[in-house]
């Protein structure tokens, strides 16, 4: 990444979810994936990226000491602090944002349960955001959906056997969003503060930027960048990484 001003870049790795679909007793971030804890894959990847100044893992309160041991054992020197997660993912990210010093320029957010992280993609995203000269507030990654997408009736009852289709959406205009997501720190923090002022919760960070008028660019990610949500995902991710 030549011919651009060096920026202070911090990474947030949320890993404080309840993990209900994975099995609460398995503690997903510390589940052994190809012989090492799932969370460690992301930590080690960002440790190697020279542009990254600091890594902030975000974990459940009961996992803080375990995370400290993981960091020490594998020499993740960029992880100087560990953030306690909140009730929802958005609360966890906000807890971390409030600890970040004002001179930070860029925040990268990456799910702690996405082991397939491409340093090349990270560098491309950082370069585009920096070279945009603040004409872009964030860059996210995603992939075009392969399946036909249906929108169901709004008032369906959860668990009901009778669910009716309201509309078929144009698949050509729909992407499945992934992480990493990369943002201008001040814009992201401001968007979070506005959201909390309205008691508004979103399913991803870029949604908040969009809601308050920010400009978000999406670039092509990878179908390999799988998020481990259920036990079945482990087998798929293992096959992809081994390949």
Image (cartoon, rainbow, N blue to C red):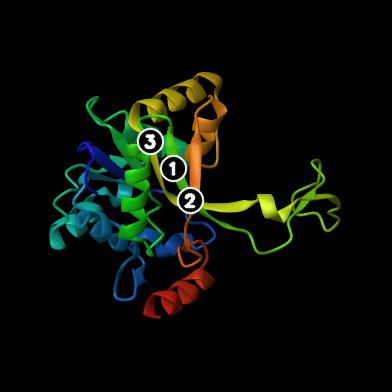
Relative vertical location of residue 38 with respect to residue 186 in this rendering, above or below: below
Mark 3 vs 1: CB contact within 8 A: no
Mark with earlier residue (1, 2): 1
Relative vertical location of residue 181 with respect to residue 19 in this rendering, above or below: above
Mark 2 vs 3: CB contact within 8 A: no
Q: Residue furthest front?
A: 3
* Disc 1 element: strand
The image position of residue 149, as x and y in percent, is 73, 56
How many numbered circles are shown? Answer: 3
Q: Residue tagged by mark 3?
A: 132
Q: Nearer the viewer, residue 64 or 103?
A: 103
* Disc 2 element: strand
Which quadrant of the figure contains the C terminus?
A: bottom left
Name the mark nearer the viewer: 3 or 1. 3
Q: Name the residue: 46% across, 37% down.
A: 90
The answer, for residue 74, to whether it is visible in the render is yes
Q: Residue tagged by mark 2?
A: 219
Q: Residues within 10 Å of mark 3 (few under 14, many from 20)?
A: few
Mark 1 vs 2: CB contact within 8 A: yes
The image position of residue 171, as x and y in percent, is 71, 55
Q: Name the residue: 39% across, 75% down.
A: 241
The image position of residue 160, as x and y in percent, is 80, 54
**Left or right: residue 91 compared with residue 118:** right
Q: Quadrant of residue 42?
A: bottom left
**Left or right: residue 60 compared with residue 172:** left
The span from disc 2 to disc 3 (Cα, nearest Å) is: 14 Å
The answer, for residue 13, to whether it is visible in the render is no
Name the mark nearer the viewer: 2 or 3. 3
Q: Nearer the viewer, residue 119 or 116?
A: 119
């Amino acid at each position: 990444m030549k011919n651009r001003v060096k920026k202070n870049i911090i990474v947030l790795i949320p890993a404080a979810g309840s993990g209900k679909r994975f099995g609460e007793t398995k503690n997903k971030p510390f589940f052994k994936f190809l012989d090492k804890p799932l969370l460690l894959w992301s930590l080690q990847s960002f440790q190697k990226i020279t542009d990254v100044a600091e890594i902030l893992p975000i974990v459940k309160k009961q996992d803080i000491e375990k995370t400290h041991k993981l960091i020490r054992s594998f020499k993740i020197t960029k992880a100087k602090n560990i953030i306690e997660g909140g009730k929802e993912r958005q609360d966890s990210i906000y807890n971390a944002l409030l600890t970040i010093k004002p001179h930070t320029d860029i925040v990268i957010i990456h799910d702690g349960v996405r082991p397939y992280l491409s340093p090349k993609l990270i560098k491309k995203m950082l370069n585009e955001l920096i070279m945009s000269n603040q004409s872009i507030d964030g860059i996210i990654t995603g992939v075009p959906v392969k399946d036909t997408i249906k929108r169901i009736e709004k008032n369906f009852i959860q668990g009901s056997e009778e669910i009716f289709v309201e509309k078929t959406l144009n698949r050509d205009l729909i992407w499945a969003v992934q992480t990493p997501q990369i943002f201008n720190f001040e814009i992201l923090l401001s968007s979070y503060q506005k959201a909390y002022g309205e008691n508004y919760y979103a399913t991803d960070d870029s949604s908040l930027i969009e809601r308050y008028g920010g400009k978000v660019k999406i670039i092509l990610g990878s179908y390999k960048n799988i998020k481990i949500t259920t036990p079945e995902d482990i087998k798929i991710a293992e096959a992809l990484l081994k390949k």
